[in-house]
Image: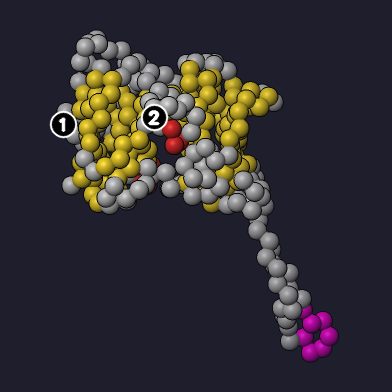
Amino acid sequence: MRVISYQDAKPATGGYCTSLKSYPKPQLNIEESLSFYDYNRLIEKTIELYPKTTAKYKIRFSRSGNKMIQTLGSIDVKMSIYDGNTLLKANDDSGYRLNSFMSVYLDSDHDYTIEIKGYSDEVAGLCRLIITQAFSFAEDGYSFDSFDHIDNIEGTNFDYYAYNQQYWVQAVRFTPTEMGDYTISLSSQYDNYLYVFDPRLGTSMYQNGEYDDDSGEGSNALLKKHLEKGIPYLVIFSQYNPSSTFTDFDKGDDCLVSFRKN
C-alpha cells in the first residue's frame, strides 16, 4: 500500500507525492499437516518466511524413536516442538550457523506441532525444514544435540564405513579441505539412497540437485557436486526403503560411503 497526497485546489495538476510509505501485504501464517511413515527416509519442507510469519507443521510418526529435526538456510530462525499446548523442546542456534537443530524422542501415532519463525519480527527469506528418523554417529565426547556434533569428515578423499539397520537413516558431515568437483558414492548389497545437503541453501533439494538413487553401479547411489572449502555438507544415507528387513547381518547391512575429489 502507498500513501500519496494530491493537490485539491485548481488547477489540479497532481498527483504530488509529498511523502511515500510502502507497507508489505500482510502474510498469513503457514499451517500444514504431515505424516512420517516407516518407509520415509526424510521429509523436506521449503519455507518462505515473511516478517512476523510463523510456520506450523502438525506431524504424526508411524514409529516411536529419536528424530533429527533441523532447519537449513541463511536466515536466523528459531524452532519449537509442542505436544498439544505443552512445549517439549525449543532451539535457536544449534544448527548450522543461525539455524535450529534438535534430536528428540517422539512417540508413534501421536500429534506434535513443529513451529518455525524468525528470530526477530524483521526476519524474512527462505529456509527449509529437514526431518529424519535419527540415527547418526556423534563425534567422540559429544552427545547428539547439535549440527556441530554430527560426525565430521575433513579432507578430499575418504572412505567412511558404516553399517545399517532397519529404520535407520544415518547422517555425517563432509567438510572439504579444498574447493573442487567431488564424487560422493555409496556401495552396499542393499538398495540405497543418498542426499548431500548444502546447509547454506534454503531452496529445495530438487532445485539444488542434492539427492540420488541409482546413478552408481547397480542399485547404488552416486552424486557429483561442486563443493566449497570449509563448508560442512550434510550427508544423509539409508536404504531406499528404510523399513525393509535385512537377510544378511554379516555383510548385507554394511555400507561404504566414498568421498573423492575429481
Q: Position of residue 257 (x, y in %)?
A: 25, 31
Where's the N terminus, which quadrant? bottom right
Residue type indicated by callout 1: Glu
Residue occupying the far front of the picture = 141
- Secondary structure found at label 2: loop
Q: Are marks 2 and 1 in contact (CB under 8 Å)?
A: no
Closest to the observer, 111 or 66 = 66
Q: Is residue 127 above or below residue 4?
A: above
Left or right: 12 as drawn, with respect to 176: right
Looking at the rendering, the stretch of residues picked out in magenta corresponds to 6-12
Label of residue 139 in the image = 2
Q: Is residue 256 something one can see in this rendering?
A: yes
Q: Position of residue 153 (x, y in %)?
A: 31, 36
- Secondary structure found at label 1: loop
Q: Is residue 145 magenta?
A: no
Closest to the observer, 103 or 2 = 103
